[in-house]
Image: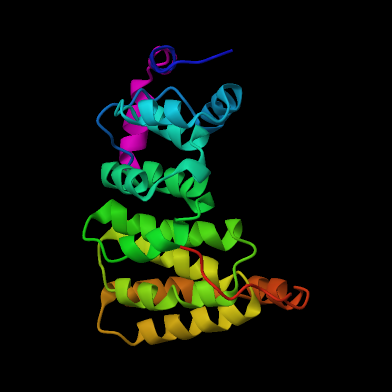
Amino acid sequence: MAWNCAEILRLLASRPDPHAVAGMARYGIVAKRVHGGWSTPQLKKLAREIGRDHALAQELWSSDVFEARALATMIADPQKLTARLMDTWAMDFDNWAICDGACINVFRYSPLAQQKCREWSTRPEEFVKRAAFALMAGLTVADKAAGNEVFLNFLPLIRRAAVDDRNIVKKGVNWALRQIGKRNARLNRAAIAVARELRRLDSRSARWLAADALRELESAAVQRRLQAQPPPRKQRKTARG
């Protein structure tokens, strides 16, 4: 079955749920237009029915409907993403759920992902900056072939952004640091060292971030898992992007 944007928008609008919309708002998920009647598993099921369709994803994104944008991130083709399109979508982010969904569902699989981590980490826009660190967190899982140097090079960006006291940004930076520190033993040691540096800064944001990251990275559970990992294979040293 071939889907078009208009019929998908009608389908998404057919399940209005004001109570769900209010609940989402309490968790900071606010957008221009939200229907509220679609859970993430339901959208993923719909995305599987539609299949990969990059042109349709762009049409859905342009609708400004929260559920349509979430669906767009699930059917977009990461190999067809351009730097311009990624920047456009990032500038459209208006809540953490769409930001993180785009980063996890599609951006982290793009050959441009590492480049965007670096570029967006210095942007002033709250959700664009968060996207840099959500993307770093996503790459720790998605880019299994990347060498340690890729993630070690992200640590100065994390260190610099740790003093940003905006909650959305702060939690993204924290997420990236914790994920890097759980990738392997070497990165764990490097991430812990950064967290200990941050703990000494005259910044409430940095100290909170450090305490939260150290609580997990130094935990017995994480240390046991890292010690049980097999010896590292030779990894590529060059970063993409």
Q: Is residue 140 left or right of residue 115?
A: right
Residue 218 can be seen in this image: no
| Residue 31 position by quadrant | top left
Q: What are the residue bounds of the magenta stretch?
A: 10-28
Q: Position of residue 83 (x, y in %)?
A: 36, 50
Q: Residue at x 36, y 34 (%)?
A: 23
The residue drawn where x is 29% and y is 43% is: 88
Q: Quadrant of residue 6?
A: top left
User: Residue at (36%, 25%) from the top-left corner?
Assistant: 19
Residue 21 part of the magenta-drawn span: yes
The one nearer the camera, 115 or 103, is 115
The majority secondary structure of the magenta stretch comes to helix
Please say if 129 is above or below 104: below
- Res 209 visible: yes
Q: Position of residue 84 (x, y in %)?
A: 32, 47
Task: Give 59 or 173, whichever is nearer the viewer.
Answer: 59
Q: How is the image coloured?
A: rainbow
| Direction from residue 21 to residue 78 in the image, left or right | right
Is 162 in the magenta? no
Q: Is residue 140 left or right of residue 28?
A: right
Q: Residue at x 50, y 51 (%)?
A: 110
Of the 4 image quadrants, the one containing the C terminus is bottom left
Compared with residue 77, is residue 21 higher up or lower down, i.e. above or below?
A: above
Seen as rendered, the residue at the extreme left is 124
Which corner quadrant holds the N terminus? top right
128 above or below 61?
A: below
- x, y (%) of residue 224? 71, 75
Residue 63 x/y as whole percent: 31, 25
Numbered label tally: 0
